[in-house]
Image (tube, grey):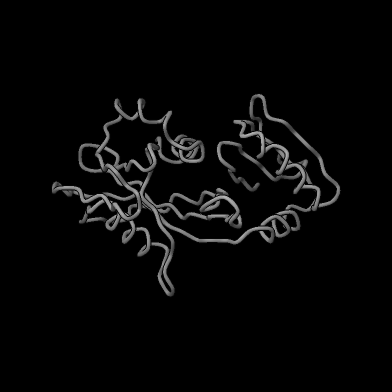
Amino acid sequence: MYKVFIDNCLFIFTTSNDIPHIEGAITICIKKVDDVKNIINKFASMHSNDSIIIIHDNIEELVAFFENIYIIKVAAGGWVFNGRGELLMINRYNHWDIPKGHIEHGESFENCAIREVSEETGVGNLSIVKNLGISRHIFRYSAGEPEILKITHWYRMESNFEGLFIPQHNEDIQEVEWVNSNKLKLYLPTMYRSLREFYFDNIIE
């Protein structure tokens, strides 16, 4: 099964033997892999919150065709918790977000995740607890530019950092906060759907 978000619309590629149960999802069977382009263009242009399940006999062929449409960028980031169980979050473009960034040449996923968290927030004393998996979403930097498929490797981290935050303003980060679980409920609606679903699938224990 392969998941990718375009804005708040979720697309799932799978076979008829592994169809997930998602309430209200739209299920579409295709015979030719290139049919996926028209389906994505149709639903993505609606800027919907739909979940679209696309079924094909050969998931590897479908994914290979799909990924060939886009420029692929690989990133890594961290879901960082302190000793009080608070989650490190950033505010960018009025969306609450999780620190992450693109991998530099020769850099490991783990080192990239630690570096990006530190650069975007000023938080140090970071240690990786475990690998949480990946997320995928499609975006473009500005209108008219090619669409990019960002594949982000996520890690759960811990830190005892108690210093001042240093938001990375040249990355349009306005705020950095430690957010407790009660307050997090207020922040979730402002997060991108891809992050909200990753949180419920991979962070809550």
Q: Residue furthest right?
A: 31
Q: Residue furthest front?
A: 144
From the top left corner, tell me how far across and down residue 147 is, in percent. Answer: 60, 54
Q: Is residue 190 above or below residue 145?
A: above
From the top left corner, tell me how far across and down residue 203 is, in percent. Answer: 41, 39
41, 2: nearer the viewer: 41
Q: Count every numbered label the image shows and give the total.
A: 0
Query: Quadrant of residue 96 in the image?
Result: top left
Q: Residue at x 32, y 59 (%)?
A: 114
Q: Residue at x 36, y 30 (%)?
A: 187
128, 179: nearer the viewer: 179
From the top left corner, tell me how far across and down residue 168 is, in percent. Answer: 28, 53
**Side of 192 relative to 23 (left or right):** left
Q: Residue at x 71, y 41 (%)?
A: 18
Q: Is residue 144 above or below residue 194?
A: below
The C terminus: image quadrant: top left
Q: Residue furthest left?
A: 163
Q: Residue at x 44, y 73 (%)?
A: 105
41, 157: nearer the viewer: 41
Q: Residue furthest bottom?
A: 106
From the top left corner, tell me how far across and down residue 120 is, in percent. Answer: 30, 53
